[in-house]
Image (tube, grey):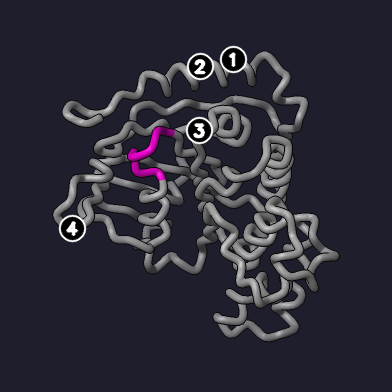
Amino acid sequence: MATSPIVELLDVTKRFGDGPVVIDRLNLAVPPGEFVTLLGPSGCGKSTLLRLIAGLSPATAGTLRIEGRTPEAAGAGLGFVFQEATLLPWLTVAHNVELPLRLRGVPAAERAATRRQVLGLVGLGDRGGAYPRQLSGGQKMRVSIARALALAPKIMLLDEPFGALDEMTRERLNEELLAIRREQGWTAFFVTHSVAEAVFLSDRIVVLAPHPGRIHAVVSVDLPGPRTAATRLTPSYLDLVTRTSQVLRGVAPASGHA
């Protein structure tokens, strides 16, 4: 028996007010545990699609279901990591990570246990007393990921979380992210402009075209795991980067748009 999708989009369309269509009749079914990357030029609706899945913005038309429910009803099972770490500067790392649990009324002892677990997962078990100003960019993003993981999500939504980091830090965090996912098994939707990053992380890459946002192609990534730094040197990886780059170059704006 086929596994039911954890996320399913049927003819999903998004328009803001009287403006142009941002996402046009998008169809996608994602099984549990899959890592899906949204790749495409600016204006193709990648971040908007994450917000629709998160229930932060409603679809204008079509159907979006998470485990058969609306995004609003499924919100407790989602973790969201934004482009910026969005940490509260007056709170310590520990208190930033515990904040969503505190807002949900989780008891202090349970909050502390969860915080220790997730900070350990991201390699910051000894930095709970630090403030955001004392952290590097990579460390801040680790804290942001830990905060999302504290909610024990079934689905992680990651909107270009490593885009502002240097290449070495980005690659290291890619490897750490996959290691955490192997341990926890969540489904991922990841936004990036980097073909290399998309290939390294993904089971499938959804290439979007802009104006309006629509699926141009879907690239399956059949690389063995666990993926490590050595994976980036293999012929299979390099071939997939080349082929995906060619697909991305084939993306053209709709007629009448620059």
Quadrant position of the C terminus in the picture: top left
Q: Are marks 3 and 1 in contact (CB under 8 Å)?
A: no
Closer mark to the observer between disc 4 and disc 3? 4
Disc 4 or 1, which lies upstream in sequence?
Answer: 4
Question: Which residue, given by chain and number where applicable, does mark 1 sit on?
Answer: 239
Residue 92 shown left or right of residue 67 in the figure: right
Amino acid carrying mark 2 in the image: Arg
Disc 3 or 1, which lies upstream in sequence?
Answer: 3
Residue drawn 24% across and 41% down?
24
**Which stretch did the figure color magenta?**
40-46
What secondary structure predominates along the stretch shown in magenta?
A: loop
Q: Image quarter for residue 251?
A: top left
Question: Which residue, given by chain and number where applicable, does mark 3 sit on?
Answer: 204
Closer mark to the observer between disc 2 and disc 4? 4
Q: CA distance from mark 2 to mark 3?
A: 13 Å
Amino acid carrying mark 1 in the image: Asp
Q: CA distance from mark 3 to mark 1?
A: 15 Å
Picture coordinates of residue 2 (x, y %)?
Answer: 45, 40
Amino acid carrying mark 4 in the image: Gly
Question: Which residue, given by chain and number where applicable, does mark 4 sit on?
Answer: 17
Residue 58 shown left or right of residue 46 in the figure: left
In the foreground, 42 or 111 = 42
In the foreground, 163 or 229 = 163
> In the displayed structure, would residue 202 be above or below residue 87?
above
Picture coordinates of residue 158 (x, y %)?
Answer: 53, 50
Residue drawn 38% across and 62% down?
55
User: Can residue 155 be seen in this snapshot?
Assistant: no
Question: Which residue, given by chain and number where applicable, does mark 2 sit on?
Answer: 243
